[in-house]
Image (spheres, coloured by chain):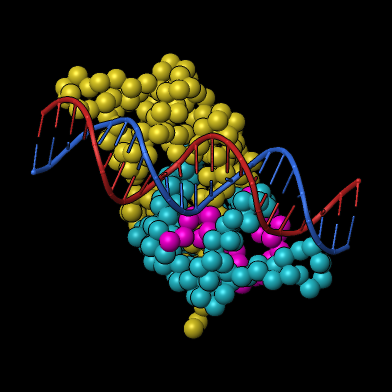
Chain colours: A cyan, B yellow, C blue, D red
DNA sequence: TATTGTTATACTCTATAACTATA
DNA sequence: TATAGTTATAGAGTATAACAATA
């Protein structure tokens, strides 16, 4: 059958899902005085130590933007800078213990905050959704045997 | 701690998907000099005329924030204000023809912009993803008969 | 008094451009 | 010269508080 419902409906569903997810993220961020961007940066830095430029690339930001963002986090004792061991120009960024604790907390809270949504699906449905999203995001069409 | 694959990974996938969708929205906005918030406001105003407070509530913003946002849109000839016919205190907001045209264009562009993602799935996969997302968003667990 | 909206103020986020230091 | 990062500057988004006009 070639009368597809079309991508439009999927797009709408993606947009709705995105706003719902962002709302949860914003709520958690607000509760901890973290912007959405900071929250995202913290999520990335949770288990990594990156150079400023690397983190800026991850976030899709200019390095100057990241400078300010890390400035503010550093002032609050959540992140820290240190000169790179291998490149005299580079600066590593990483979370302080307090920052990491906050990142972990936020990560846990996010699952809680989204659980009203995710629990609308059975465990099998959750797994399938996850697989489909990852397949979509990672670009591979792959086999349909899901 | 038995770090289960559980809902955590789904949460990550949802977050990634949300950021990807938001990136598409931002890109479309940027191409038309509209912020994400403005884009959202335009989407809401596409077929409606609202009072400032109503629109602020829709967007989850303070009225003062909306004042500035509409100021800028009005300066560009995309939105317009008019006194409410029924309440001397209230102000209606609506899109100008140019603003409405822009809103329609953005709506179309979004599907195009997301197509690199959505086309990573087969039509069947797209349909299944859509169904799962809607089921999740609308809360009903429903049958699992994939 | 309560509500609607604007203005004043302040802070964050963001980018561009100019700059310093290192490679 | 090229790269890594910061600083200066500017504009948008955001909220709180103070205010004017209307209900």
Q: Main secondary structure of the magenta part?
A: helix
User: Which contiguous range is marked in magenta?
Assistant: A33-61
Q: Residue at x 51, y 75 (%)?
A: A98
Residue C20 spot, x, y in % from top left = 78, 56
All told, the count of numbered labels is 0
Residue A123 spot, x, y in % from top left = 43, 66
Q: Is residue B127 magenta?
A: no
Residue placed most toward the observer, A6 or B70: B70
The reply to whether residue B123 is visible in this rendering is: no
Residue placed most toward the observer, A90 or B129: A90
Q: Residue at x 60, y 31 (%)?
A: B31
Q: Is residue A50 magenta?
A: yes
The reply to whether residue B38 is visible in this rendering is: yes
Residue A99 spot, x, y in % from top left = 52, 72
Q: Residue at x 18, y 23 (%)?
A: B88
Residue B121 spot, x, y in % from top left = 60, 46
Q: For residue B47, what is the image quadrant?
A: top left
Q: Residue at x 55, y 39 (%)?
A: B26
Residue B48 in the figure: left or right of residue B128: left
Q: Quadrant of the C terminus of chain A?
A: bottom right
Q: Which residue is most to the top? A: B97
Q: Is residue A11 above or below residue A110?
A: above
Q: For residue A28, what is the image quadrant?
A: bottom left
């Amino acid at each position: 059958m070639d009368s597809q419902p079309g991508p439009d409906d999927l797009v709408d569903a993606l947009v709705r899902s995105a706003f719902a997810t962002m709302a949860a993220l914003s709520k958690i961020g607000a509760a901890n005085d973290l912007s959405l961007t900071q929250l995202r940066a913290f999520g990335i830095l949770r288990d990594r130590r990156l150079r400023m430029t690397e983190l800026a690339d991850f976030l899709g930001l200019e390095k100057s933007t990241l400078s300010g963002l890390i400035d503010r986090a550093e002032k609050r004792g959540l992140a820290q800078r240190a000169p790179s061991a291998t490149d005299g120009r580079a600066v590593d960024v990483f979370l302080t213990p307090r920052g990491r604790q906050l990142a972990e907390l936020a990560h846990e809270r996010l699952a809680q905050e989204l659980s009203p949504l995710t629990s609308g699906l059975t465990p099998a449905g959750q797994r399938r959704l996850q697989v489909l999203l990852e397949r979509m995001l990672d670009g591979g069409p792959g086999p349909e045997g899901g």
